[in-house]
Amino acid sequence: MRPIPLLPRGLLVSAAFALAPCPALSEDLVMIEQAGCHYCAQWNAEIAPIYPKTSEGAFAPLRRVTLGSDEMDALMLARRVNFTPTFVIVDDAGQELARLEGYPGEDFFWSVLQQLLVEATDYTPDP
């Protein structure tokens, strides 16, 4: 009978880390807005009340940021924001993953947002 070879200690530690669950990244939907923006007001009337109740809202909670505010400095945007509202999907570090410039209306907002979430994150839409 042959003895079973022992694995080096470092290999066991590496295997344990490889099998450990990774913490899930969390994404936010950042709405960059400004006072007097007609399309921001329209989004607020049509989408804001129901957004937190949707699967998209649960996956990427809404965070509002005013255009030009100090809060924008914490975001790592791919490019300058020129229009409001601009919706930016960011990871937990504030890195931009995807962007929707403007508000295309209630009929198109949901499908565009869902597509951006699927392409940029691990979001799986409800069937």
Image (spheres, helix red, strand yellow):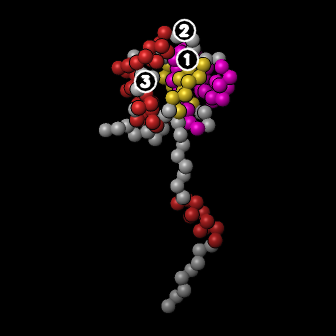
What mark, if any, has residue 33 been given in the picture?
A: 1
Above or below residue 50? Residue 127 is below
Residue 113 makes an appearance in the image: no
**Magenta stretch holds residue 71:** yes
Tell me if mark 3 has few (under 14), some (14-19) or many (20+) residues whose alpha carbon lies within 10 angstroms of its own. few
Left or right, residue 95 beside residue 1: right
Q: Which residues are magenta?
A: 69-92
Q: Quadrant for the C terminus, please.
A: top left
Towards the viewer: 40 or 112? 40
Above or below residue 26? Residue 11 is below
- Measuring 40% from the left and 26% from the top, which residue is drawn there? 50
What mark, if any, has residue 102 been given in the picture?
A: none
Query: What residue type is disc 2 on?
Result: Gly
In three-dimensional space, the C-alpha distance between marks 3 and 1, rounded to whole angstroms, equals: 16 Å
Tell me if mark 2 has few (under 14), some (14-19) or many (20+) residues whose alpha carbon lies within 10 angstroms of its own. few
Position of residue 100 measured from the top left corner of the image (x, y, whole percent) = 48, 23
Position of residue 88 measured from the top left corner of the image (x, y, whole percent) = 53, 26
Q: Is label 3 or label 1 in front?
A: 3
- Measuring 63% from the left and 73% from the top, which residue is drawn there? 8
Position of residue 113 measured from the top left corner of the image (x, y, whole percent) = 43, 27
Above or below residue 55? Residue 3 is below
On the image, numbered disc 3 is attached to which residue? 49
